[in-house]
Amino acid sequence: MTLRTFAPSILGHPSRVRGIAVTFGMLSLAGLLTPTVASAQGAVQDTAFVLNTFSFLIWGALVMWMCAGFTMLESGSVRSKNASVICLKNIGLYAIAGLMYYIIGYGLMYTDVSSFVGSLDWFYGPSADEIALLGGDESAAAAVVENGYAVTSDWFFQMVFVATTASIVSGALAERVNLWAFFIFTAVLTGFIYPVIGAWTWGGGWLGSMGFTDFAGSTIVHSTGGWAALAGAIVVGPRWGKFRKDGSVKVTAPSNIPAVTLGVFILWLGWFGFNGGSQLALGSAADAVAMSNVLVNTNLAAAAGVVTAIVVSKPILGRTDLFAGLNGAIAGLVAITAGPNLDDARWAIVIGAVGALVCTAGLKLLERNRIDDVVGAVPAHLFAGIWGTLATAIAAGANIVDQLIGVAAVGAFVFTVSFALWTLLEKTIGVRVSRSVEEIGQDAAELGIDAYPEFVLMADPDDGGDYRDPD
């Protein structure tokens, strides 16, 4: 019986009409609600997938922009005769990091991680379900969405962190490191050293299982780069004339103060992606709130770092130092990176301020030990990174023993492997340019170009000899 023929047969019975109407209404509502609830749940899941993926991509792009910040910071910090080589090193290291992490690094860090390292998952790419979906198989959509984000969006976000680690080494060894030795070291750092540390921690290895906490990488990213830079600075040695026989230290002022300052601002901006993106999700209200707190804490720590470094630079360094203030911003950012998800933002100010104090004192400590770090990368990234990692035990509820073990283990592994690799490179191809190349400048001697061709290279009036010169 169709609805058209069924309707007249019941019109003479009002009570039955009302009863059947109610019954039909309830059945209709139930029939409508069931697919509506399911559709709503699917829509929420789809939306979370899109937002999570977009978050990885947009924050990753912002972190990638930090490479421009490092380039500006380093090229402005060195003497003008070495600025072009700095530009080549920075775009080169980013390219090498991307290739090595794609070919081997991501697999070692995240694929089937044992306690120590993952597997050789060569040329990491989209999942089988994602490839099927792109090929038109709509039945694969549910499995893709269930993952929570696009597979390659996560790879991209992780990759730009690797490049940051390599950038730290570049600045510390500027003006004298052999370009090809640096590129070889960068390949090993981004393809093996960093992925091993990542596997221990974020990849679910022994440190992560133990309880070691590092939200966005004060130790995993910044201290790793700092340890590698320190090992390189020791093996490569200081620039000629930096440390004199009488014990004095030659001040090598930045060649382009506006470029250095702009570089720090770019890094500060990029750090919002670095820490904010490390929330790793933007699919719920809780994620949005947490991410907002992370960005505020990141900004406060950097601000506190600047003010603190400016204040303490006079008693520590003997002068009110712009370079110290700029490094104070970076130190504050590095320090808060281990625990930017604090609920109480006042702790971010404390952590950033202490990080800047540690960094400024670290600059003096390196000078006393004749370790030449052109941009202050070791104090800003290593020393402040250690402090920030330990500070999570004070402000964020981490276990201090776990944090100490993590800092020590990462330092021992990275420094030992880096020192051995720098030493091997020294004994094979050499790790530094000749003294004559250093005096002329790497731009003209190695690249045949000048960053500032309208400038005339002048003899250094403050050349007081070097402690390594014969008597």
Image (spheres, rainbow, N blue to C red):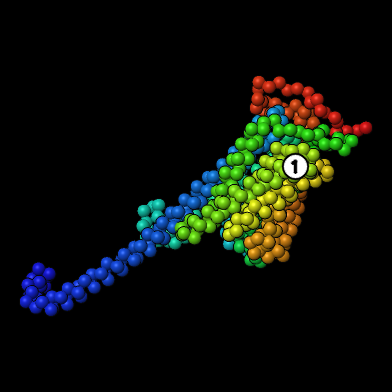
How many marks are shown on the rendered structure?
1
Q: Residue at x 9, y 78 (%)?
A: 13
Where residue 202 appears, as percent x and y from the top left, is 61, 59
The three-letter amino acid code for the residue at tag 1 is: Ser
Q: Quadrant of the C terminus?
A: top right
Say few, some or many: other residues with alpha carbon within 10 Å of mark 1 (under 14 / 14 to 19 / 20 or more): many
Q: Is residue 302 left or right of residue 458?
A: left
Mark 1 element type: helix
> Which residue is label 1 attached to?
313
Q: Is residue 311 left or right of residue 247?
A: left
Q: Is residue 160 visible?
A: no
Q: Residue at x 47, y 53 (%)?
A: 53
Q: Is residue 359 left or right of residue 16?
A: right
Q: Residue at x 67, y 33 (%)?
A: 257
Quarter of image, res 320: top right
Where residue 369 appears, as percent x and y from the top left, is 83, 44
Q: Reply above or below: 319 against 339.
A: above
Q: Residue at x 46, y 59 (%)?
A: 284
Q: Is residue 318 visible?
A: yes
